[in-house]
Image (cartoon, grey):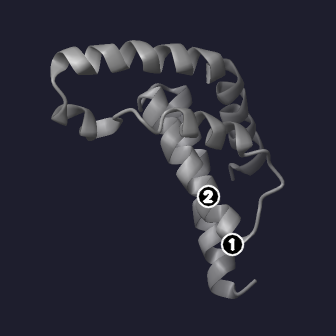
Amino acid sequence: MTEYELERKKKLIGDLVSNSRRILSNEIAFPLGIHIMAKIFRWIIDIEPLNFNSQEFIEDDNQLDDYPLGSDRLKYKIDILIKYEKEIIELNELYRSKLMRLSKDIIDKYAI
């Protein structure tokens, strides 16, 4: 691994910790937080996989692929958005407790 890749990986791990804190403190909507976690994990895996199970975040994010997240939601008619919101809530409830625990594990393992 090059020095650049090592520094990039360290920064991305810091981003995981930061986003985990945002998820647990409700500073970010849960679905968007999980989407960001999955994206960061994919970037890290491109460098070198962590000794951490990122698959749960990636699987949940894959379940949400067809739904608008973040500011993309503003582009939808309210009736469609309400319909999607109900479906997103149902999906999130399947994963929420496990992903909250994993977020806490990330903070415990990688926070400096």
| Badge 2: residue crowd in 10 Å (few <14, some 14–19, many ≥20) | some
The amino acid pointed to by label 2 is Arg
Q: Name the residue rendered at 32%, 14% in the picture.
A: 83
Query: Distance from label 1 to label 2 (Cα)?
Result: 9 Å
Q: Position of residue 68 (x, y in %)?
A: 34, 35
Q: Name the residue rendered at 63%, 17% in the picture.
A: 94
Report which quarter residue 56 is drawn in.
Answer: top right
Report which quarter residue 29 is drawn in.
Answer: top left
Q: Position of residue 112 (x, y in %)?
A: 69, 53
Question: Quick check: 78 left or right of 37?
Answer: left
Q: Is residue 88 above or below residue 73?
A: above
The amino acid pointed to by label 1 is Ile
Q: Name the residue rendered at 28%, 14% in the picture.
A: 82
Q: Position of residue 27 (x, y in %)?
A: 42, 30
Q: Secondary structure at mark 1?
A: helix
Q: Quadrant of the N terminus?
A: bottom right
| Badge 1: residue crowd in 10 Å (few <14, some 14–19, many ≥20) | some
Q: Which residue is mark 1?
A: 47
Q: Is 17 or 98 nearer to us in this picture? A: 98
Among numbered discs 1 and 2, the one appearing first in the sequence: 2
Q: Is residue 52 above or below residue 105?
A: below
**Looking at the image, which residue sits at the far bottom?**
2
Question: Quick check: 46 left or right of 79?
Answer: right
Q: Is 28 or 38 nearer to us in this picture? A: 38
Question: Is there a contact, CB below 8 Å, between mark 1 and mark 2?
Answer: no
Q: Which of the labelled discs sits on residue 97, or is there none?
A: none
Q: Is 98 or 72 nearer to us in this picture? A: 72
Q: Secondary structure at mark 2?
A: helix
Q: Which of the labelled discs sits on residue 42, or is there none?
A: 2
Q: Position of residue 95 (x, y in %)?
A: 64, 23
Q: Name the residue rendered at 54%, 20% in the picture.
A: 91
